[in-house]
Image: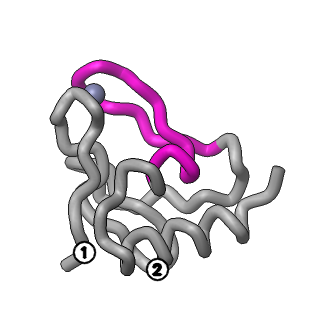
């Protein structure tokens, strides 16, 4: 089980980071960052995060590595 990523407001933003994408809280399917403009929205404050913003919120190196790989494979 990977770490959760929290929004700046303290709400869980991403419940799980998988090798292919991130699963937002309550979602069944992960969001796959195919484009750099893809983003996750906080269910509480509606702040949006693209993959680069999520890297800044992640704390474990494993999660950061997975997110950086997603960022590299996303297209502009
Ligand atoms: Zn928030």
Instruction: Report the residue marked by disc 1.
Output: 2
Q: Is residue 13 above or below residue 67?
A: above
Label at residue 68: none
Q: Which residue is mark 2?
A: 19
Is residue 47 a member of the stretch shown in magenta?
A: yes
| In this view, 8 is above or below 71 | above
Characterize the local packing of mark 1: few (<14), some (14-19) or many (20 or more) Cα atoms within 10 angstroms: few
Instruction: Pick the residue in front: 1 or 32.
Output: 1
Could you tell me which residue is drawn at 71 percent across and 68 percent down? 72
At 38% from the left edge and 72% from the top edge, which residue is drawn? 63
Residue 43 visible in the snapshot: no
Q: Per the image, is 48 magenta?
A: yes
Residue drawn 44% across the image and 69% down it: 64
Q: Which residues are magenta?
A: 38-54
Quarter location, residue 42: top left
Q: Quadrant of ligand 1?
A: top left
Check disc 2 and report its element: helix, strand or loop. Answer: loop
């Amino acid at each position: 089980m990977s770490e959760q990523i929290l929004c700046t407001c303290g709400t869980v933003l991403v419940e799980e980071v998988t090798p292919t994408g991130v699963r937002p809280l309550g979602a069944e399917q992960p969001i796959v960052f195919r484009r750099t403009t893809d983003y996750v929205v906080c269910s509480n404050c509606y702040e949006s995060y693209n993959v680069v913003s999520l890297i800044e919120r992640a704390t474990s190196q494993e999660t950061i590595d997975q997110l950086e790989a997603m960022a590299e494979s996303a297209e502009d």
